[in-house]
């Protein structure tokens, strides 16, 4: 398989606001973003995906139907991306598709066997586009004893690492995770720090009927409640040592509403939103300071990088350090994760490992993903 070429990356993420689709050119050591497209997810499908991710019970019938429908939507995202960019499908070596996580239950300790499950049928993607598709990246790392997440630190290290600088890349998606890139060039470390946008988005939808709090304006109109914040910070995940990863299974509206009920008094909705923003900022900074107190540069990506109030809060709590977005490193923050899975697809096809045991806790480096061949075009 050729080492250098054009790869498509697909990412929908915990926030489920859209399908991010990119084309990159990569040889593994670098990744140049050539085209990007945000493909909307229809409300009906989004609600079904949220139900699968948050409901403790579901049916195989529902999983199968949504898996197929999401695969169709991923394929449509690829077709639209290539059409808009005027790139013939025949030029694409492969698609790296993250899929949509509907359960993430990595083993914490003891004899339990962890698992993770992503849907968005790669057979459908390969058949509809004709392009070789690489998918199901996380389960091989879990099989090797890892958390299956986060996987982006290997990409961050390859593309954003810099000798002589202790640097952190913080991805603020539905959940937040960090990649710790030592100046020595030794293997990156990283882990999920806790909630990112998921709780803020869910609370905004519940009270304002909007998908997210644009620029954090609603949060900035409220005042964080310290009693509620203290209760939320007692979530057991937040005190676990890495390696660790999390998702909507742990941080969701029912959990928040239980904490509000136990508070014993009513809060204004905007004050809850301000508290959720404070929770995201505090847990992210705690993770950074625990992992690399010497870091001088923090680069943000993911949807949270567009939340002006959140970014200002992070800069306020990290005085004397550079706080900027990955655009300063050459990749727009909206597209970093999709680029990462295009890059991971390349790694899989050339037979190179895509995980970092220093991040996931796996027993060894492994080649990630299953390969679904395309067909002549």
Image: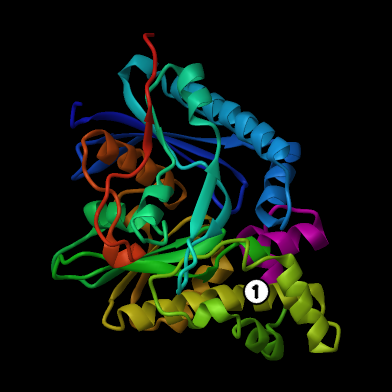
Task: Tell me the chief SS of the magenta region.
Answer: helix
Figure check: 144 above or below 368: below
Figure check: 25 above or below 248: above
Q: How is the image coloured?
A: rainbow
Mark 1 lies on residue: 276
* Residue 202 x %, y %: 71, 60
The magenta stretch spans which residues? 201-219
Figure check: 226 above or below 359: below
Q: Kindly identify the residue that appears in the image at 64 percent across and 30 percent down.
A: 69
* Residue 267 x %, y %: 82, 81
Nearest the eye: 2 or 54: 54
Task: Indicate the quadrant containing the N terminus: top left, top right, bottom left or bottom right.
Answer: top left
Mark 1 closeness class: few <14, some 14–19, many ≥20 residues within 10 Å: many
Q: Kindly identify the residue that appears in the image at 60 percent across and 53 percent down.
A: 15
Kindly indicate the quadrant of the structure image that contains residue 257: bottom right
Q: Kindly identify the residue that appears in the image at 35 percent across and 67 percent down.
A: 190
Nearest the eye: 318 or 103: 103
* Residue 16 x %, y %: 61, 48
Q: Is residue 326 visible?
A: yes
Q: Residue furthest top?
A: 377
Kindly state the secondary structure of the residue where label 1 is placed.
Answer: helix
* Residue 181 x %, y %: 25, 67
């Amino acid at each position: 398989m050729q080492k250098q070429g054009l790869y498509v990356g697909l990412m929908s993420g915990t926030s489920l606001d859209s399908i991010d689709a990119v084309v990159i050119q990569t040889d593994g050591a670098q990744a140049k973003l050539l085209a990007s497209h945000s493909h909307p997810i229809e409300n009906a499908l989004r609600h079904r995906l949220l139900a699968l991710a948050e409901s403790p019970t579901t049916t195989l019938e529902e999983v199968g139907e949504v898996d197929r429908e999401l695969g169709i939507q991923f394929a449509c995202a690829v077709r639209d991306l290539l059409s808009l960019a005027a790139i013939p499908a025949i030029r694409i070596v492969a698609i790296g598709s993250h899929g949509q996580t509907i359960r993430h239950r990595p083993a914490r300790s003891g004899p339990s066997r962890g698992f993770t499950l992503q849907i968005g049928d790669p057979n459908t993607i390969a058949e509809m586009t004709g392009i070789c598709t690489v998918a199901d990246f996380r389960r091989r790392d879990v099989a090797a004893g890892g958390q299956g997440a986060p996987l982006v630190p290997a990409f961050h290290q390859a593309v954003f690492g810099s000798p002589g600088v202790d640097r952190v890349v913080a991805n603020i998606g539905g959940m937040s995770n960090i990649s710790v890139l030592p100046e020595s060039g030794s293997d990156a470390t990283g882990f999920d720090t806790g909630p990112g946008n998921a709780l803020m988005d869910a609370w905004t939808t519940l009270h304002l009927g909007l998908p997210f709090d644009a620029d954090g304006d609603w949060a900035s109109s409220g005042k964080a409640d310290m009693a509620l914040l203290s209760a939320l910070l007692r979530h057991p995940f937040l005190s676990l040592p890495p390696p660790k990863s999390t998702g909507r299974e742990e941080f969701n509206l029912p959990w928040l509403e239980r904490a509000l009920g136990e508070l014993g008094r009513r809060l204004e909705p905007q004050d809850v939103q301000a508290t959720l923003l404070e929770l995201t900022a505090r847990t992210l900074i705690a993770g950074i300071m625990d992992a690399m107190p010497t870091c001088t540069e923090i680069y943000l990506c993911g949807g949270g990088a567009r939340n002006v109030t959140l970014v200002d809060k992070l800069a306020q709590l990290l005085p004397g350090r550079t706080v900027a977005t990955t655009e300063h490193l050459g990749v727009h923050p909206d597209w970093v994760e999709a680029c990462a899975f295009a890059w991971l697809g390349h790694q899989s096809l050339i037979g190179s490992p895509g995980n970092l045991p220093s991040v996931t806790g796996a027993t060894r480096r492994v080649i990630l993903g299953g390969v679904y061949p395309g067909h002549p075009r």
